[in-house]
Image: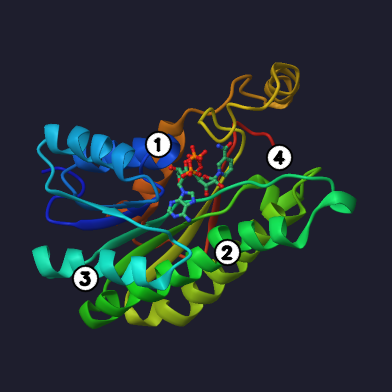
Amino acid sequence: MKRFTDRVALISGAAQGIGEATALLFAAQGARLVLLDLHAESLARVAEGCAAQGADVIAQPGSVAERSAWDAAVAAALARWQRLDILINNAGITRDARFEHMGVEQFDAVIDVNLRGVFHGAQAALQPMLAAGRGAIVNTSSVVGLHGNFGQTNYAAAKAGVIGMTKTWAREFGPRGIRVNAVAPGFIATPMTAAVPAKVTEKMTAAVPLQRLGAPEDIANAYAFLASDEAAYITGTVLEVSGGLSM
Ligand code: NAP
């Protein structure tokens, strides 16, 4: 039996990068999927890839910053399968600038997606999970949420906030059968980091004890572990997946 047979998972930011790798991994492991992302076309391509692995999948275009998009995604899962077992709260953006040059609109944009989006997603997904008395939520933080980073005041604030929400929800919903954890990726090779200058990438790689950037699959594997029954006694944790960057 595959790890996620009969399980229904909602994955945000699934049109590329870590979310795409996660969708394909969950599909291979037997999950039924609702994929949420801004980009309808890329999302349809990923959904086709999942379906090619035998997965039943719904592609749901929309913004995680809008509660209505989450409600539509959850409703689609319930209409087709009458259950929602897993939320992977993965969508995120960057709008980097040194603090003295950071406009409040840059701050708000990142908070809207990376923090408020995670809040909306969890609140929408919790309803069927609470009704069923079981569920697993995995939120995406970052090593930047643990340690800060030059030029990322907005991103660090959102990703540290995700850790605070994760631990709070783990306390609030553990007694009701729902586990809530976070993953803190290091520097992962995705479209998000593709624009980083080669010099910076080289410097970052040299600082990683495992001497490489992470692959999207490295994070997808961590999400899958925390979402699975193998993590049945794990809640409120922040799993850093960074090749040892933070030591
Ligand atoms: P990515 O390649 O940019 O993929 C993220 C996907 O989410 C994109 O398709 C993106 O669309 C979509 N998205 C953005 N805003 C959205 C919204 N409002 N509603 C729905 N979808 C939206 O990023 P990634 O590297 O895979 O990152 C995935 C997660 O890991 C993010 O939370 C990120 O902060 C976190 N993370 C990444 C790294 C890294 O090094 N890559 C490190 C630490 C943490 P657009 O293309 O339009 O933005």
Residue 75 bears which disc, if any? Answer: 3
Question: In the rendered view of the protein, which quadrant contains the N terminus?
Answer: top left
| Mark 1 lies within 8 Å of ligand 1 (Cβ measured) | yes
Image position, residue 109 (x, y; %): 62, 58
Looking at the rendered image, the disc whose residue lies closer to the viewer, 2 or 4, is 2
Q: Indicate the amino acid at tag 3.
A: Ala
In the rendered structure, the answer to whether residue 230 lies left or right of residue 92 reads left
Contact between labelled residues 4 and 1, with CB atoms less than 8 Å apart: no
Residue labelled with disc 4: 246
Quick one: label 4 or label 3, which is nearer the N terminus?
A: 3
Quadrant of the image occupied by residue 52: top left
In the rendering, at what x and y percent does residue 56 appear?
A: 11, 48
Q: Are marks 4 and 3 in contact (CB under 8 Å)?
A: no
Which of disc 4 and disc 1 is earlier in sequence? 1
Q: Earlier in the sequence, mark 2 or mark 1?
A: 1
Location of mark 2 (residue): 112
Residue visible at 28% across and 74% down? 129
Residue 16: assigned label: 1
CA distance for labels 3 and 2: 22 Å
Asked whether mark 2 lies closer than 8 Å to ligand 1, one says yes
